Image (cartoon, helix red, strand yellow):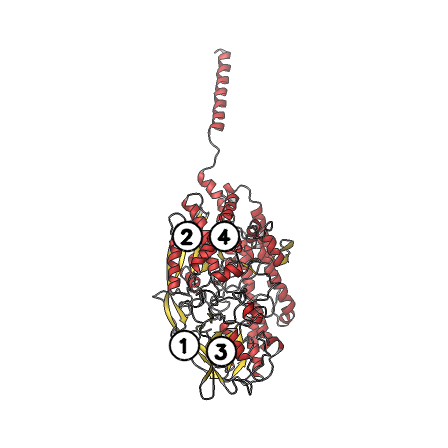
Amino acid sequence: MNVWKIVGGVFGGAVILAIGLLIGHFGISKKSPKWVDELSQDIDEKFIKEFIKEVDNKEIENNLKVLSKRPHMATTDGDTALVKWILQRWTDKDSGLDEAKEEIYDVYLSFPDKNNPNNIKVLTPTGASVFTSRLTEENLNENDQSDPEVTKPYAAYAPKGNPKGKLVYANQGKMSDFESLSKKINLTGTIAIVRYGGAGRSTKAINAHHFGVVGLIVYTDPKDINDGNADPSQTYPHSWYMPPSGVERGSYTEDFGDLLTFFSPAKNYTYRINESDIKGIPPIPTQPIGFEDAKTLICQLAGDDAPSDWQGSLGCQYKLGPGFLAGGIYTNNDVQVNVYNYAEVRPSANVMGMIRGTVEPDRYIMYGNHRDSWVHGAIDPSSGTAVMLEITRILGTKVKQGKWRPRRTIIFGSWGAEEFGLIGSTEFAEEYYSKLRDRTAAYINVDISVFANATLRAQGTPPVQGVIFEAAKQVQTPVPSLSVYDNWIRHFNRSSTVYNKLIPQLGTLGAGSDYAPFLHYLGISCMDLAYTYDRSKTSARIYPAYHTAFDTFDYTAKHIDPGFTSHQAVARTAGNVLLRLSDSLVLPLAPIDYWETLDSYYNAAESNMKAELSNRKIPLEPLKTAVARYKAASEDLRRTIENLKDTQTTPLKIRMINDQLMLVERAFINHYAFQDLPYFSHVIWAPRTSSVPSFPGLANAYSKAVSTGLLEDWNQVHHHLTIVITAIDNAASTLETAASI
């Protein structure tokens, strides 16, 4: 064989092989399959900027005009009309959502008798009436207050009755107030007048009944709501302050959810307890009045001077009673509380909307606000609904145009009957308990979106802190060149050991709005966002027209947010948070932020309880160990997230991490920890009555045991210590490697 032929053959084969390799290298696309790209897609910052730009303050203003045009108390014609309107908005062919529907619940509600209004009378010994409180508030703007659909002032769930007796003044109606008063006056058979604040609405009536009081009157003192301003020339329509005839309505209940169907959705098939078995509502007739009527009564009282910290701003020296001044206009007269309320089961609607997710459609980000109000409800709740509808308009339009779809499913809720005790949201949480518990990563609540126009006020569980910070930094305030974050930190701030710097103060969540069932019952990370007032300029406990007939569009546009730019800032911030939670590859939740709360609570327990607990051989050391374990686990998970490199090769790892981030809040849920508090199952955020700023169950049990000295109460201290240790250990375990025990 010719050697050159052999060489030529080998060379030719090598050339062909090289050409093949080159063709293979350059001819085959290196692009990842589409499904891999979708799995690894992260938040689109350009889309967030586009969203922020499109939020329109005029659209929000127009929404509010419609929402607050007529009174819309739950289940009334005004409420029904808004259900239809919101459904129409969410099913619009150009800007609607993927799905929208009504969810109906048959719920137990309390109403005043339209034909027999509640009132307070002063009666002579012969029974003649010499004074009757206002039946309606004064009409101060067009026909806002005289609208025939305006709900007359009443205390929801207060029983009907007509008790009469000598009047006494009991400050805020706290247990300590009645204890102090009872040392000077025999309260049996009296009528008490108390002011809002210091204790819950229903709690005031329950406390009064405990001391033999037979009827209760509640009013808002201008000292607490108006910075002391009581003259009509100083109040609405001339300013934001409550007018003298303003009456704060409200639900007088200690529990939330439908009162007849605890832990079950209020459907037509649901078992209901007897009305007589309801707890936590007023046991005596109770009626709210305006401070002009309160002045008529309080400024005529006889008896000793009330303590200095019981004094208000009605323009007279407050006295305790009983009864009226000798020689005064009401000498020897009694006061009668006339309540004609009735209760019945009525159908109430939630309106639910949905945008389906692409990659993780079985993971939910929820956003909600209630729809019902006591009267026109321009601020509470329609300011929040106006913002929500602007967010859904923008996102719905993007979905219909095929320009955007979130990674995770977004669920919007317009809750019904919130004012009666968070009913719509609670019934929804009960009906879909398992699905929501297993699939919901976070809940955003925007109820009153604008209390006033000074600064953002954010409340939430610690893991949501960082995503709110990130969103707030991107949104400008109505003041040019100042971000919402920078403005917020000027008004509310604290030092953080996790961030190693001054950060905005994230407030804690109680049970005042629809986040409550999702936080306390389901253990979902929650937040509540709003703009509020500068507390260095007012001491008002809330915006002054709260729950009155003066909470109208006119009041909002003139005195709360002229131009609706603060509404716009809230919409941009809340929408930004929503997009980050629904679109980020890794859920923007930070469990490490919980450690500061746990550490603070432990330090308070150690300072206030350790010595006594040691004497009783109840060790705190396991609690300290659990908190340290939680810190280590959360720091390890944070490092794991920071070190994620190739997201395309680890989609299942990211899903696992997201589940850890979602479920850590659930670890703090113990449905058996507070059996006397329905729905309150979160061992970190349950109500705390103790003055010790520590874990609520432990702190409450410790304070009671110290007070009574009973062995059974000290056993409860050990019990609650065990509960919190177990919860923190479970939370740490959730954050640790999922494949380990």
Where does label 3 land, which residue? 216
Task: Report the residue that reaches farthest toward the top.
Answer: 2
Q: Is residue 328 above or below residue 704?
A: below
Specify whether 86 is left or right of 677.
Answer: left
Amino acid under disc 3 = Leu
Specify whether 128 is left or right of 610.
Answer: left
**Which structural element holds mark 4?**
helix
Task: Report the residue that reaches farthest toward the left.
Answer: 269
Q: Nearer the viewer, mark 3 or mark 2?
A: 3
Give me the disc on residue 340.
Answer: 1
Q: Tell me how far mark 2 sits from mark 1, CA to CA.
A: 42 Å
Where does label 4 land, which residue? 57
Task: Report the residue that reaches farthest toward the bottom.
Answer: 126
Where does label 2 land, which residue? 354
Q: Is residue 8 above or below residue 140?
A: above
Q: How many numbered circles are shown?
A: 4
Quarter of image, res 232: bottom right
Give me the disc on residue 458.
Answer: none
**Which structural element holds mark 1?**
loop
Task: Kindly check if marks 2 and 1 are in contact, taking CB atoms under 8 A apart as contact.
Answer: no
Circle nearer the N terminus (2, 1): 1
| Foreground residue among 685 and 388 | 388
Q: Is residue 543 above or below residue 307?
A: above
Q: Tell me how far mark 2 sits from mark 4, CA to CA.
A: 24 Å
Residues packed near mark 2 inside 10 Å, few (<14), some (14 to 19) or many (20 plus): many
**Which structural element holds mark 3?**
strand
Task: Kindly check if marks 3 and 2 are in contact, taking CB atoms under 8 A apart as contact.
Answer: no
Q: Tell me how far mark 4 sits from mark 1, CA to CA.
A: 43 Å
